[in-house]
């Protein structure tokens, strides 16, 4: 199949994953009814935020952790329409064309193509597929796919400073983990793969805190870290504000010091810049039209004179409603008021600008 057909086939199974401390990618494996990702994406969380092309964002349970092979399994939503994409049965070959699909740097559904630079690259006793297809932060846990549209590996890591040095765990390790989990735990049961002997350890089989087979210490995740997580400092104050304006903090988290919330047709990004010490809220509204823009500009200028704590601007083609607060000036009551105002006015302006000034709806991925 050609490259576009391959991307169209794979995108519906690619999942975006976010926690309070990381973001990454996953993919759906229909034969086992699981979402696969990297262990370092979910860490010890038992719940993570997921979103995909065939379902709305939701919290989903993690039920399998394999730190040695950097694998984790997540339960998909009950109502989804993700198709079945096969796992490759052949061994990858040097020079074989491949495509990596994921969400690097928060950029949704990014596909990069390349070749297998080396099909068997041993690191720490594990064989990896080395590829020059660009793999960046946020790609972790996504699928590496051959030109037949089969998954051949799980994108896992890059070598810092190494141009074109990306590594994916071969699908044979994934298939082994899937089979071992299914045979020794049962769907939905919490299980950890022992990093020493690869035994599947469950809460009912663990010997105190040790592997029943080899005696290695096992970290069995307990409870929902995302539910109980409370960030420190300004990040914690921002999350109090997000709760106060009626939004689910867990669903809004996009890694450290970043949040994303929706109000009507508007999407709002909130970030705390730890270098400049500014809290920034940007509501990306619609886009400026190609013609008759003078009335729209006049309207934006008039509205800016009326706004308190907010400002309208244009970033490239996007109309943006923003709030900026210096961390030393952060006040819970004021921040709650201004962010609530940002939500209400974002949806309001989005509708006015489209209906009365011919602005173009923002394109969602």
Image (spheres, rainbow, N blue to C red):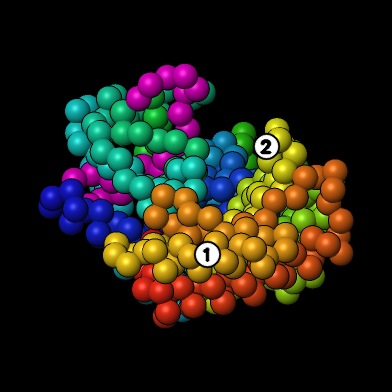
Residue located 27% across and 25% down the image: 117
For mark 1, does the 10 Å Cα neighbourhood hold few (<14), some (14 to 19), or many (20 or more) residues?
Answer: some
Q: Secondary structure at mark 1?
A: helix
Identify the image quadrant of residue 283: bottom right
Residue located 19% across and 33% down the image: 96
Q: Quadrant of the C terminus?
A: bottom left
- In space, the residues marked 2 and 1 are separated at their CA atoms by 68 Å
Q: Secondary structure at mark 2?
A: loop
Residue located 79% across and 65% down the image: 336
Query: Residue 36 at x, y = what percent?
Result: 47, 54
Identify the image quadrant of residue 289: bottom left
The residue furthest top is 161
Tag 1 or tag 2, which sits nearer the N-term? 2
| Residue sitting nearer the eye, 221 or 28 | 28
| Residue sitting nearer the eye, 361 or 40 | 361
Looking at the picture, does residue 41 appear above or below residue 16?
above
Looking at the picture, does residue 326 appear above or below residue 248?
above
| Residue sitting nearer the eye, 352 or 177 | 352
Query: Residue 35 at x, y = what percent?
Result: 47, 59
According to the image, label 1 marks what residue? 300
Task: Specify whether residue 152 is painted magenta.
Answer: yes
For mark 2, does the 10 Å Cα neighbourhood hold few (<14), some (14 to 19), or many (20 or more) residues?
Answer: few
Can residue 226 be seen at all in this image of the molecule?
Answer: yes
| Residue sitting nearer the eye, 362 or 51 | 362
Stretch in magenta = 145-164
According to the image, label 2 marks what residue? 214
Query: Residue 131 at x, y = what percent?
Result: 32, 30
Can residue 47 be seen at all in this image of the molecule?
Answer: no
Q: In this rendering, would 16 be left or right of 317? A: right
Which label sits on residue 179?
A: none
Closest to the camera, between mark 2 and mark 1, is 1
The residue furthest left is 1
């Amino acid at each position: 199949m050609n490259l576009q057909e391959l991307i169209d086939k794979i995108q519906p199974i690619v999942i975006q994953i976010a926690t309070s401390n990381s973001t990454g990618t996953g993919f759906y494996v229909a034969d086992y009814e699981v979402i696969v990702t990297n262990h370092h994406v979910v860490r010890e969380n038992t719940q993570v935020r997921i979103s995909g092309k065939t379902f709305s964002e939701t919290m989903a349970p993690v039920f399998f952790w394999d730190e040695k092979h950097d694998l984790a399994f997540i339960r998909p939503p009950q109502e989804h329409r993700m198709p079945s994409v096969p796992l490759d049965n052949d061994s990858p070959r040097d020079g074989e064309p491949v495509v990596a699909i994921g969400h690097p740097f928060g950029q949704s559904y990014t596909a990069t193509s390349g070749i297998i630079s080396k099909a068997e690259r041993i690191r720490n006793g594990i064989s990896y597929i080395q590829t020059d297809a660009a793999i960046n932060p946020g790609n972790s846990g996504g699928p590496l796919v051959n030109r037949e549209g089969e998954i051949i590996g799980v994108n896992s890591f890059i070598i810092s400073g190494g141009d074109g040095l990306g590594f994916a765990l071969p699908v044979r390790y994934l298939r082994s983990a899937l089979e071992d989990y299914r045979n020794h735990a049962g769907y939905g049961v919490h299980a950890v793969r022992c990093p020493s002997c690869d035994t599947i350890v469950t809460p009912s089989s663990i010997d105190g805190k040790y592997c029943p087979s080899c005696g290695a210490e096992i970290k069995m995740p307990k409870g929902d870290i995302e539910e109980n997580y409370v960030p420190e400092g300004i990040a914690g104050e921002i999350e109090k504000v997000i709760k106060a304006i009626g939004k689910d903090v867990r669903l809004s988290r996009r890694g450290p010091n970043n949040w994303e919330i929706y109000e009507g047709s508007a999407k709002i990004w909130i970030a705390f810049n730890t270098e400049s010490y500014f809290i920034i809220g940007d509501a990306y509204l619609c886009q400026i039209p190609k013609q008759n823009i003078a009335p729209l500009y006049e309207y934006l200028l008039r509205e800016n004179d009326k706004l308190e704590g907010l400002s309208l601007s244009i970033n490239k083609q996007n109309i943006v409603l923003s709030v900026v607060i210096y961390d030393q000036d952060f006040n819970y009551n004021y921040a709650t008021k201004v962010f609530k105002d940002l939500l209400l006015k974002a949806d309001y302006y989005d509708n006015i600008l489209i209906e009365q000034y011919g602005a173009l709806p923002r394109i969602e991925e």
